[in-house]
Image (cartoon, rainbow, N blue to C red):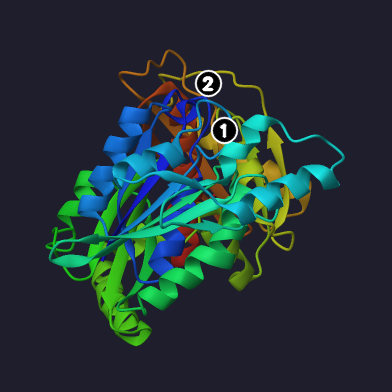
Amino acid sequence: MRAEILSIGDELITGQRLDTNSAWLSARLLELGIRAAFHTTVGDDLDSNVDAFRLAMERADVVVATGGLGPTADDLTRDALAAACDTELDVDRESLDRITALFARRGRPMPERNRVQALVPRGARPIPNPNGTAPGIELSRDRAGRTPVWLFALPGVPAEMIEMWHASVAPRLQSEFPRPRVWKHHVVKCFGAGESELEARLPDLIRRGRRPEVGITVSQATISLRIQAEGTDEGECDALIAETRAAIDACLGTLVFGTGDDELQHAVACLLQERRYSLAVHESGTQGRIASWFAEAGAPSVWRGAIVEPDSPGEADPGRPDAESERVIERARRCRDAFGADIGLAVGPWPANRSSSDGARIVFAVAARDGAFSQTASVAGHPDLVRTRAAKQALNGLRLWLLRETTSTRG
C-alpha cells in the first residue's frame, strides 16, 4: 500500500518556507503501516494542482494534501480536488454555520470570501477544524479493477493539521486499512571512514531490494545507516533488524559509535560516565564546537569546562617535526589541570596556509593522569565543514582511546 503527500503553496516551491508537514505525515502514515512513496510540491496554480491530484490518485492508494484551503484567490485545493474527481463543489451547510459562528465569537463580521471555505467536492465529507476557519476534506473515489483511492486535504498550518490528523484522518485510515504490515526503523551511526569505503565494507547490505533495506546517508562527516524492516508484526521486524545490525557491527567494528539521534559527543560522554572520568577541552581552530556539543549533550557529571582560543594558525618548526604535537599535548595537560579533570583533550591550532582544495592536517592530543598521546588528522572539504570534521576527528580519537584504555604515546 502506497501513499502520496502533496504540499501546496507558492511559498514552498519558491523556498520562502520549509515544508515540515510532509516529513511529519510520512512518519505518521508509516505508523499505520502505509508507506509514503511520493512527496510532491506544487504551487498555487489550478492546472498544476489538478494534474498533481490526478497523478497521485492513479499511483497511490492514499493521498494527503496540505495547504490551499484558505479563503483567498490563490487557495485552490477545493477547486483542484473537484476538477480532478470530475465533480462539482457544493456548500456544506454545517461547515458554513461553524465558520459563521467562529467569527461571531471573535466579535468580527465574516468576510464574504470566507464562504468559499464551506465548499467541498460533491460526495466529500468535511473534516472539522476546531482551531481555524478552514475545514479539511475527505473523500474516496473508485478505480476500475482496483481498490478505491482515499484523499484527504488538510490546512497547511502545522498545529491545525496535526490535531485534525489525530482526530479524524488517522482513525479513518485505521478503520479502512486495518494495519496490514508493520514498519520499523533503526539507525546506526558511524564515523572514521568515507561513504564509499564504508559501503565497500558492507557486502550486499546496501543492495536495493534487500530485506530489510539499508540506506546510507552522510551529514557533517557522520554516516548514518538506516535499517528499514517490514513484517507482519513488530517481532518479525525486530528479528530482521537485529540480524542486520549484527552484520553491520561485525563488518565495521569501532566505526560504529551509536544509534538513533546519537552523536559522537553522546558516545564519548557515555564512555566517560562508565569509567567515571571527567573531561576538559582546549580548542584552537575548531571555534568551540566540541565545547558547544558537550554543553548541549547534558552530561554535567563528566564535563568540566573548556578553553577556546582565537582562530590563529600554528607555526611549524622544520627542525623539530614533533614540536607541534608536544605543544598540543602540553595544552591538553594544562587544560586538564586547570579544570581539575581526569582527561584533557586539546585540538589545534589551525594550520597556516591551508586552502579548501588541498585540505589540512590538524593535531589533537589526549592527556590522562597516567599518560598522553597525540595524533595528526587529515581534514578536507568545503571550508564550512572542515572545522566540524576536525572537531569530530578529535572526539573520535578520544572515543577510540577510551575504548582501548591504552596510550600510543607516553607523556
Q: Residue 274, how many percent across, how many down?
A: 59, 72
Vertical placement of 111 versus 150: above or below?
above
Q: Residue at x 50, y 72 (%)?
A: 171
Disc 1 secondary structure class: helix
Q: Is residue 331 left or right of residue 240?
A: right
Vertical placement of 73 versus 159: above or below?
above
Check disc 2: other Cα within 10 Å, few if <14, some if 14-19, many if 20+.
some
Label 1 close to label 2 by CB (< 8 Å):
yes
Q: Determine which residue is flagged by label 1.
A: 327
Q: Residue 379, how many percent across, how many down?
A: 38, 32
Amino acid bearing label 1 = Arg
Q: Is residue 101 left or right of residue 266?
A: right
Which numbered disc flags the more N-terminal residue, 1 or 2?
2
Foreground residue, 402 or 239?
239
Q: Quadrant for the N terminus, please.
A: bottom left
Q: Residue at x 60, y 21 (%)?
A: 311
Amino acid bearing label 2 = Gly
Q: Is residue 109 left or right of residue 224?
A: right
| Distance between the alpha carbons at the discs numbered 1 and 2 | 10 Å
Foreground residue, 235 or 72?
72
Q: Determine which residue is flagged by label 2.
A: 314
